[in-house]
Amino acid sequence: MATNAHRPAPINVSDADLADLRERLHRTRWPGPLPAAPWEAGTDLTVLRELCRVWADEYDWRPHEAWLNTLDPITVPVDGVDLQVFRASSGRADAMPLLLTHGWPGSIVEFRHVIEPLVDPVAGRAAFDLVMPSLPGFGFGGKPAEPGWGVTRIADALHALMVTELGHTRYGVAGGDWGAIIGSRLAQLHADAVIGFHTNMPLLGVHRNPSWAEGADEHEHRLLARWDRTDATGRAYAQIQATRPQSLAMAQTDSPAGLAAWILEKFEAWSDGGLGTFMTEDLLTNLMFYWIPRSAASSAMIYYESRLDPDGRVHPVPGVPTAAAVFPAEINPATRRWVEPNYRLARYTELPRGGHFAALEQPALYARDVGEFFAGLKR
């Protein structure tokens, strides 16, 4: 039974904070270019300067704030942290509660274009009542004041949110990035409540498994080469955030251009088509979830805490039907042969396009896969 401990939590950013943001962007102290190809040594300065100009001079936060406040934002105290939760209801009696969980460097903005097709689906897909929390330490929600908030504790907190606080005895789970890791752990720990688990980042491990090369075909060898390139040049960010998150976050909290450089580089590198794949307003609204509430450090702590959580990283999900949606530009490439040992696979789909931020990059493909998977479970 729901506790009704939640309270309304609309977002209302002050005019002073918005003016301060514009002033800081205008006063950015830019470095000179490095002798490297664009994006090879990090964020491309030409692209970043233009995005920061748009952020300062053209971007209007207020319509996006108004949209967020249509999602019935509430604050729910769970395990000592005030979780901010956004919701969208289908209004249908047969709708399934679905916990939809983002990752880093994302926010619920990732789900902006899939909300409507999930709550008001076409025939053959399930309809959902969406529950979209900001992860502890992320966005406008509460920040943990004590250590220990790794994957396991977050998974337990989200389960308590769904069952104890919101009154859903059975619910579905979907997510990518940290949402995939937390969702996997949640489905393992609370299989009696989880109807099914959908992931667009199947968990294979932090580094590639040497055994995958045995019997690999040509396609798998190409994917293994991608794993090697990512291991060599693309995982330093995680090591920094898992060991020294406070040091880097000082600059990100003081400089919006510095924050944008760190986050937008990931949207460029991890997507199928780079920054041009996304609407500029979506990218900037996502950045606001880190800038305004000063959550660069507290969001990075998920890496730090999860490094210390020995049970929190990669877990099979015994007994819980799982859908793996594999998008071709996902930073951790996968094949069915590599994925199947980790899950009770009820659905495996290789999508024709899209990357790590699947719901934002390819909302139609993402919504279809989620809707068809859970509709199949209901049948």
Image: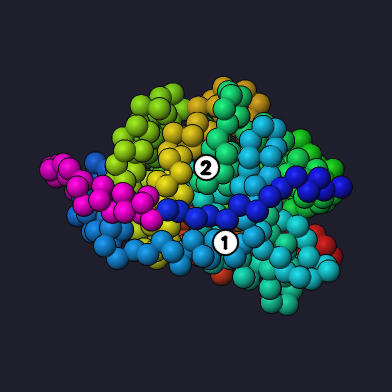
Residue 136 is left or right of residue 246, and the answer is right
Query: Are the residues flagged by discs 1 and 2 in contact, CB closer than 8 Å?
Result: no
Count neighbours of disc 1 (C-alpha within 10 A) and say few if under 14, some if 14 to 19, many if 20 or more. Answer: some
Reading the image, the residue beneath label 1 is 69
Q: Residue 146 falls in which quadrant of the image?
A: top right
Quadrant containing the C terminus is: bottom right
**Residue 91 place in picture, x, y as percent:** 76, 70
Tag 2: amino acid? Phe
Q: Which residues are magenta?
A: 15-39
Give the structural element (helix, strand or loop) at label 2: loop
Reading the image, the residue beneath label 2 is 138
Q: Residue at x 37, y 64 (%)?
A: 60
In 3D space, how far apart are the residues under numbered discs 1 and 2 (Cα atoms)? 17 Å
Using the rendered image of the protein, determine whether residue 300 is visible from the camera's viewpoint. yes
Using the rendered image of the protein, determine whether residue 366 is visible from the camera's viewpoint. no
Give the structural element (helix, strand or loop) at label 1: helix
**Residue 136 place in picture, x, y as percent:** 58, 38
Colour mapping? rainbow
Looking at this rendering, what residue extends furthest in the right direction?
1
Q: Residue at x 17, y 44 (%)?
A: 30
Looking at the image, residue 94 lies above or below residue 82: below
Residue 344 is left or right of residue 216, and the answer is right
